[in-house]
Image (tube, rainbow, N blue to C red):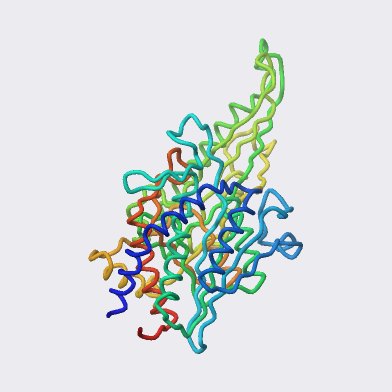
């Protein structure tokens, strides 16, 4: 029997087991700081399918690394897990990277069922994290288990990352890199709607502080409103966003209205309605193009804020701080051999040509590329619009379709033998 047919048959025969695994994985509500149960469940799965397992608590080497970014430094309830399938030798290795952490479910009243129910209904599995990205992780595990059950031997190594902290900037993937779990290339099954992303934008959080002069509201002309001055700052940020995006002519961004947005997500200021506000803070997220360095983007915003055309702000400059989460940009050559293999296998399984675009958000691919010298592709079965959304779901058929594509791609890249 042809390998492709054998893989397809295996997926059909193991569909019930795969769905049950995904349900259980969702039921472990692995928000940050509570990943331990889900990670132990994944580790047991890896052992059952015959992989060597490394489970560890990230330590000081991670926290002291210049790429480290996390709101916490204690990971005692958040182990990292890596599964290793050693090849025969002489072949290319691959990292299959998926994060186990999920964002909080938000208001439970916005959900039709419990956010961590794992409900199966109408060909979908529901629950927080099912599309971002436990469905993609399940596709990876199905692909590995399929190849092992079929008795296929590979020349190259397969490394399965189940990492923590992606939602805060990638500390788990950085920990895996520092432990030596890198490869010749990587695939990350984030929720792409089955599109293939060879490029991923980066992003970083910023805080701008605008100072004014307080005064009584009845004589507000004696003061300077930081709220009014912040409007000038906001306009400058919008101008910078427009200027930066007009320079981007990469066809992979042609269907994305704003390739690298600068989003202002929080504004706070003032402490009394009858007083002129003397301080406003503006917090936001700045997108970084795949070919750009983080420092270059930072300098553009810094220079824009230093050249505000306002007499008060020239005498009382705003301050700019980079804080909190950040995701490094990633970029693999669209002509990379793994890209060709993935596209060919996509077409073979689906009968359609894949859509190739640039990612509209950051992933752990940037860290793998920059810190781990592991060029990365993002491709997964999740529904992009359902990530971080209430009533999050994934289509079961897409999980197994992606698993078939991934199994064939692992086979090609790591140079597996015939059945």
Q: Quick check: 106 above or below 38?
A: above
Q: Looking at this view, name the residue that lies furthest to the left.
A: 351
- Residue farthest to the top, as pictured: 218
> Residue 317: x and y, percent?
67, 39
User: For the point 66% across and 39% down, which residue is it?
Assistant: 318
Q: Quadrant of residue 65?
A: bottom right
Q: Is residue 399 left or right of residue 269?
A: left
In what quadrant of the picture does the N terminus appear? bottom left
Q: Residue most toward the bottom?
A: 90
Position above or below: 41 against 1: above
Foreground pick, 406 / 200: 406
Closer-to-camera residue (168/86): 86
Number of numbered callouts drawn: 0
Percent position of residue 117, x then y: 48, 42
29 versus 65 height, above or below: above
Measuring 30% from the left and 69% from the top, which residue is drawn there?
9
Task: Indicate left or right for 115 with 81 as reference.
Answer: left
Q: Quadrant of the C terminus?
A: bottom left
Residue 314 position in % (x across, y down): 65, 38
Task: Choose between 248 and 106: the one closer to the eye.
Answer: 106
Which of 54 and 209 lies nearest the eye of the viewer? Answer: 54
Query: Residue 41 appears in which quarter of the rendering?
Result: bottom right
Name the residue rendered at 35%, 65% in the picture: 11
Query: With respect to residue 112, does 383 lie above or below?
Result: below
Residue lying farthest to the right in this orientation: 60
Position in image of residue 44 (x %, y %) = 57, 63
208 left or right, relative to 199: right
């Amino acid at each position: 029997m042809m390998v492709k047919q054998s893989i397809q048959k295996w997926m059909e025969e193991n569909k019930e087991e795969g769905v049950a695994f995904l349900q259980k994985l969702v039921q472990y509500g692995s928000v940050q700081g509570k990943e331990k149960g889900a990670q132990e469940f994944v580790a047991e799965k890896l052992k059952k399918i015959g992989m060597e397992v490394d489970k560890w608590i990230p330590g000081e080497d991670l926290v002291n690394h210049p790429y480290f970014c996390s709101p916490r430094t204690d990971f005692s309830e958040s182990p990292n897990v890596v599964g290793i399938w050693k090849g025969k030798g002489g072949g290319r290795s691959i990292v299959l990277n998926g994060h186990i952490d999920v964002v909080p479910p938000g208001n439970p009243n916005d959900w039709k069922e419990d956010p961590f129910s794992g409900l199966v209904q109408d060909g979908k599995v529901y629950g927080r994290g099912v599309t971002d990205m436990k469905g993609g992780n399940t596709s990876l595990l199905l692909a590995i288990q399929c190849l092992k059950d079929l008795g296929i031997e590979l020349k190259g190594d397969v490394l399965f990352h189940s990492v923590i902290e992606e939602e805060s900037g990638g500390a788990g993937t950085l920990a895996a890199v520092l432990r030596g779990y890198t490869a010749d290339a990587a695939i990350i099954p984030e929720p792409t709607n089955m599109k293939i992303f060879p490029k991923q934008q980066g992003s970083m959080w910023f805080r701008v502080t605008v100072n004014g002069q307080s005064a009584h509201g009845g004589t507000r002309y004696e003061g300077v409103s930081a709220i009014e001055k912040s409007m000038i700052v906001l306009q400058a940020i919008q101008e910078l966003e427009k200027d930066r995006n007009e320079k981007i002519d990469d066809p992979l961004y042609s269907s994305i209205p704003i390739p690298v947005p600068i989003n202002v997500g929080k504004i706070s200021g003032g402490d009394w309605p009858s007083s002129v506000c003397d301080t406003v803070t503006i917090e936001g997220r700045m997108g970084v193009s795949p070919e750009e360095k983080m420092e270059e983007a930072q300098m553009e915003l810094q220079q824009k804020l230093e050249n505000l055309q306002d007499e008060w702000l020239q005498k009382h400059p705003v301050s700019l701080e980079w804080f909190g989460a950040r995701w490094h940009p990633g970029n693999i050559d669209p002509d990379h051999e793994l890209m060709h293999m993935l596209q060919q296998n996509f077409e073979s399984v689906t009968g359609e040509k894949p859509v190739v675009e640039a990612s509209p958000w950051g992933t752990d691919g940037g860290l793998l590329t920059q810190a781990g010298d592991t060029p990365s592709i993002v491709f997964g079965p999740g529904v992009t619009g359902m990530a971080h959304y209430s009533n999050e779901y994934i289509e079961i058929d897409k999980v197994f379709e992606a698993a078939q594509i991934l199994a064939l791609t692992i086979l090609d890249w790591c140079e597996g033998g015939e059945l």
